[in-house]
Image (spheres, rainbow, N blue to C red):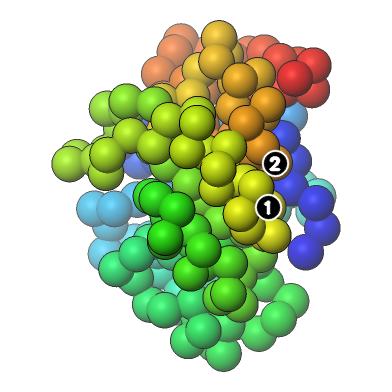
Amino acid sequence: MTALPRLYAIADASFGDPVQLAQSLVMGGARLIQLRNKQAGAGEFLDQVERLLSLAPVDVRIIVNDRVDVARMAVARGVHLGQTDLPPAAARKILGFDRTIGFSTHNLNQALEADTFPIDYIAVGPIFPTFTKQNPDPVVGLRDLATIARAVHKPIVAIGGIRLENAAEVFNAGAASVAVVRGLLDCANVQTRTREWIQAVERS
């Protein structure tokens, strides 16, 4: 897998049409975007992913949240898996080794286990309190993020409550990339906000 960009943007359907949100993220400069729609059925989600792929520039990597089947059928760049999704080894068999697979973890033990999986990056979070997810896992915090970063070999994508004001601390703790939802989407102009984020993370 090529190196992760510093900003990992998530187009979450809870903030609006995920395809339109993703287009705004792209126009703002995001080059790694996860499409997330927890409420959509497989057919609707597949249609959204395919529409986004038809619109996105070739240098934009589109990652599908949760659904390995949708990622495979749409020929997306990869998939992001949670703890209760299809196991990474099974996803790798389906997608092959030219696709990106990420995996969510919430503590040191899960991250250590994930480091042995056939995945490309380990997501760790929530780093700070977050209101994006219902029933979020316990907050990891910067100290435990740093412990995890020292213990694993795969690149870490930090997620959960990350804002422009605290992103530098997250990178200093060992994250290769920060995944952002509300900090990008909960605003009047997603495109402008994305540019602000990219400028900020490039300075971090």
Which amino acid does the dot numbered 2 rest on?
Ala
Q: CA distance from mark 2 to mark 1?
A: 6 Å
Count neighbours of disc 1 (C-alpha within 10 A) and say few if under 14, some if 14 to 19, many if 20 or more: some
The mark found on residue 155 in the picture is 1
Residue 130 position in % (x across, y down): 32, 28
Closer to the camera in the image, 196 or 148: 148
Task: Name the residue tied to disc 2.
Answer: 176
Which amino acid does the dot numbered 1 rest on?
Pro
Residue 200, by quadrant, is top right
Secondary structure of the residue carrying numbered label 2: loop
For the C terminus, give its image quadrant.
top right
Residue 125 position in % (x across, y down): 42, 41
Residue 72, by quadrant, is bottom right
Whether label 2 touches label 1, CB < 8 Å:
yes
Secondary structure of the residue carrying numbered label 1: loop
Residue at 57% x, 90% y is: 93
Residue at 56% x, 56% y is: 122
The mark found on residue 86 in the picture is none
Q: Left or right: where does residue 44 sit relative to residue 163?
A: left
